[in-house]
């Protein structure tokens, strides 16, 4: 579960940063999320990042 959380967190951070780094880049994930509008897309990206952070922190000390 720790690895899943870290993966979601990294994917969320990349999806949050990508529009600022290169606004012209179109990936499959960003295009899929942007279909619902700008506000919902940012909520989904933030939610994925937050979920990944919570999973990673909650299972961080477990082996």
Image (tube, grey):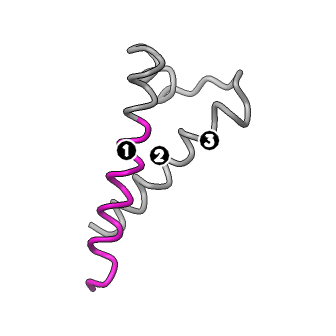
Q: In the rendered view, would you say 11 is above or below 44?
A: below
The residue singled out by tag 2 in the image is 12
Q: Position of residue 2 (x, y in %)?
A: 32, 69
Q: Name which of mark 1 and mark 2 comes first in the sequence.
A: 2
> Quadrant where the C terminus lies?
bottom left
User: Residue at coordinates 26% horizontally, 66% vertically from top-left?
Assistant: 1
Instruction: Please tell me whether residue 58 belongs to the stretch shown in magenta.
Output: yes
Q: Residue at x 43, y 21 (%)?
A: 39
Proximity of marks 1 and 2: CB atoms separated by less than 8 Å: yes
Q: Which secondary structure type mostly characterizes the magenta part of the structure?
A: helix
Q: Tell me the residue at 40%/52% (across/down).
A: 8
Query: To which residue does mark 1 refer?
Result: 48
C-alpha gap between disc 1 and disc 2: 5 Å
Q: Which disc is residue 17 wearing?
A: 3
Start-end of magenta stretch: 45-63
Secondary structure under the numbered disc 3 in the rendered image: helix
Quadrant of the image occupied by residue 21: top right
- The x and y percentages for residue 25 are 67, 26
Q: Which numbered disc, 3 or 2, marks the residue that appears first in the sequence?
A: 2
Q: CA distance from mark 3 to mark 1?
A: 13 Å
Asked whether residue 30 is drawn in magenta, I would say no
Spatial separation of the CA atoms under disc 3 and disc 2? 9 Å
Q: Secondary structure at mark 1?
A: helix
């Amino acid at each position: 579960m720790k690895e899943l959380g870290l993966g979601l967190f990294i994917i969320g951070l990349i999806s949050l940063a990508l529009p600022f780094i290169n606004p012209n880049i179109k990936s499959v994930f960003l295009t899929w999320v942007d279909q619902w509008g700008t506000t919902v897309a940012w909520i989904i990206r933030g939610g994925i990042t937050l979920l990944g952070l919570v999973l990673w922190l909650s299972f961080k000390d477990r082996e």
